[in-house]
Amino acid sequence: MAVRIVKHAMEIIYLLTDQNLIQVIVGAIVNSSAGVVRCQAIDILPNRCVNQAIYIITTSAHESAFKNIKTMAKCLADELINAAKGSSNRY
């Protein structure tokens, strides 16, 4: 089911933007990741920033699809497009 949602979201992204799907997804992850750099004694893996960005995107897509007529795939596509653009309409 999750694979089907992501596949439909990618099709929607391609139809709406006519851009490379990977470029849109990478841009969304980069714009959603934490941007604050602090001096810390503990090393944080770069993987954690990517995981947090993916978590934020999927959580906001889930919250926008809850009690809404739009499908989960459409909400995920909208969230990825808005995050890639750096829009303020995202979570």
Image (cartoon, grey):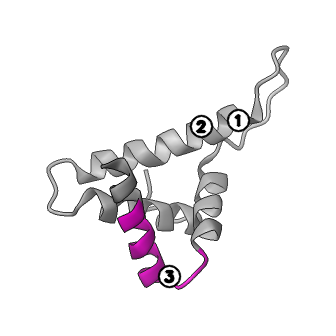
Residue beneath the point at 64% across and 45% down: 33
Q: Is residue 42 visible?
A: yes
* Spot occupied by residue 34 in the image (x, y as percentages of width and height): 66, 41
Q: Is residue 70 above or below residue 14?
A: above
Q: Callout 1: few (<14), some (14-19), or many (20+) C-alpha neighbours within 10 Å?
A: few
- Between 64 and 14, the one nearer to me in the picture: 14
Expressed as whole percent of the image width and height from the top left, the position of residue 48 reads: 66, 32
In this picture, is 49 found above or below 40?
Answer: below
| Location of residue 13 by image quarter | bottom left
Q: Residue at x 38, y 47 (%)?
A: 60
Q: Main secondary structure of the magenta part?
A: helix
Compare residues 4 and 26 and report the one nearer the observer: 4
Q: Position of residue 31 (x, y in %)?
A: 63, 55
Looking at the rendering, the stretch of residues picked out in magenta corresponds to 7-20
Circles 2 and 1, Cβ within 8 Å, touching? The answer is yes
- Relative placement, left or right, of 38 versus 32 is right
- Where is mark 2, residue-wise? 51
Q: Residue furthest top?
A: 41
For label 1, the residue is: 47
| Residue in view at x 67 percent, y 37 percent | 49
Q: Which mark is residue 17?
A: 3
Residue kind at label 3, given as amino acid type: Thr
